Image: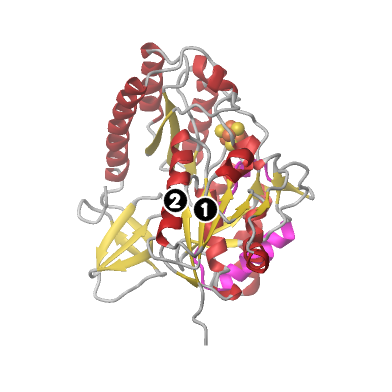
Amino acid sequence: MNPTPRISFYTLGCKLNQAETAALQNAAEKNGYRLVSFREPADVMVVNSCTVTNRADRKTRQALFQARRRSPDGIVVLAGCFPQVNSDSSTEIPGVDIILGTRDKFDLYSAIADFKKTRTRHVRISSVDNRKRLSSAFIAATDRTRAYLKIQEGCNNFCTYCIVPYTRGNPVSRDFDNTITEARELANAGYKEIVLSGIDIGAYADSGKRLIDVLRALEDISDITGIPGIERIRISSIEMNTLSDDLIKHIGISTKIMPHFHLSLQSGSDVILKSMKRKYSTADFSTKVETIRKYIPEASIGTDVIVGFPGETDALFEETVAHINKMRFSYLHVFRYSARKGTPAANMKDQIPESVKRQRAKVLNNVDSRLRRSYAVSFYGTTQPVLWERYKNNLLYGLTPHYIQVQYPARINRHNTISKIVLDKNNIVF
Ligand code: SF4
């Protein structure tokens, strides 16, 4: 009897990409494969690529090279954003057997089957335009507690630094009924938390239903079916302009939607925001944050910031630092600007030297550490429900509703359950 073929995955880039890999991994067994680590030899090795930065391009090539070296006779697959925008150079990379674009990667298993018949290089890169609906309904999970439910894809905001509109195409929303059916299946399968994901989920629109309708329907699932199902719903990240006041109010009264917002600021300078073609000013952003705090005073508000965007002088960077301090975010994700070929910002003058970008990132990373600590400390002495996600060396690890990481000593594994603990300096993971 032939042993079950092994498949491994390597993922670069954003959370959506991670979620999409997890979806493909979930389908491995059904398609007759055994999942193994990317560090081991395998019969099929998939690199789910990213092209958001030059570094991501480099890492994609390195991962392909490693895969080929590790398994000289295996099938090497390059999938996702890199081939979608670099179709010519993708086909020139030696040792790659199958190339699949951002839409086509969901046909992974049929592409492998086709390749096995012919053993000739197989390239499928469909246009990302004109999609009416998401073609592949899929789920993904980091483990058995949390599932990423993709409800939207694509973006047409064309921020000047971003390659996403070129790699993932126009916005398209998932069928509403199909979304809820899948969420119900996730509840049945025992998932406790659903993270709604997409590129611009606030832009969700299907048959007159908006994001708030999806949330309401998800909240009702266990009430209708009686399944002790989804206990937590989290919004992965949302553009400030599409986060309506009604939505904030609704989250404020919901017992299931977590009081956690990831709102990308990108810069705290109005000059830079304009040059980035972001559709808000720092004043708009402040107003939104005030509205969140009005309805949900202790909400977790995290953000993304790009340092070293073309034209960012020391004075403009200082404006960003000042604005961040004013917003009192609960955490920052700091990115150094990286020029992407094909985007308007790549051709802007006044590109910033790498050394300056590194220095600015260091400044903001220090701000991030301080903000995380002071936000977490504000919960000392409070009782919080924690969804336990991991158990190792007699310690449980999990997240509070406000996205604070905690650990707790336990003799038994209470993975995938929720229990309340009092937060203090010993159980918060900084
Ligand atoms: S909103 Fe801007 S940064 Fe976000 S995906 Fe769309 S173009 Fe890119």
Tell me, yes or no, if residue 235 can be seen here. no
**Residue 261 screen position, x and y as percent:** 49, 42
Badge 1 marks a residue whose secondary structure is loop
Q: Amino acid at mark 2?
A: Phe
Q: Outermost residue, left direction?
A: 426
Instruction: Decide: few, some or many residues near mark 2? Use Cα within 10 Å; few <14, some 14-19, many ≥20.
Output: some
202 drawn magenta: yes
Rendered image quadrant of residue 175: bottom right
Is residue 102 shown left or right of residue 50?
right
* Region in magenta: 176-204
> Would you place residue 155 above or below residue 31 in this image?
above
Residue appearing at x 35%, y 50% in the figure: 404
Is residue 416 shown left or right of residue 107?
left
> Would you place residue 410 above or below residue 273 in this image?
below
Residue under label 1, please give it. Answer: 95
Report how far apart the C-alphas of labels 2 and 1 lie in the structure: 8 Å
**Residue 331 screen position, x and y as percent:** 37, 39
Residue appearing at x 58%, y 39% in the figure: 89
152 drawn magenta: no
Counting every numbered tag in the picture gives: 2
The numbered mark at residue 212 is none
**Mark 2 close to ligand 1, CB under 8 Å:** no
Give 232 or 294, whichever is nearer the viewer.
232
**Residue 100 screen position, x and y as percent:** 63, 52
Rendered image quadrant of residue 97: bottom right
Give 52 or 315, whichever is nearer the viewer.
52
Residue under label 2, please give it. Answer: 65
CB atoms of marks 2 and 1 within 8 Å: yes
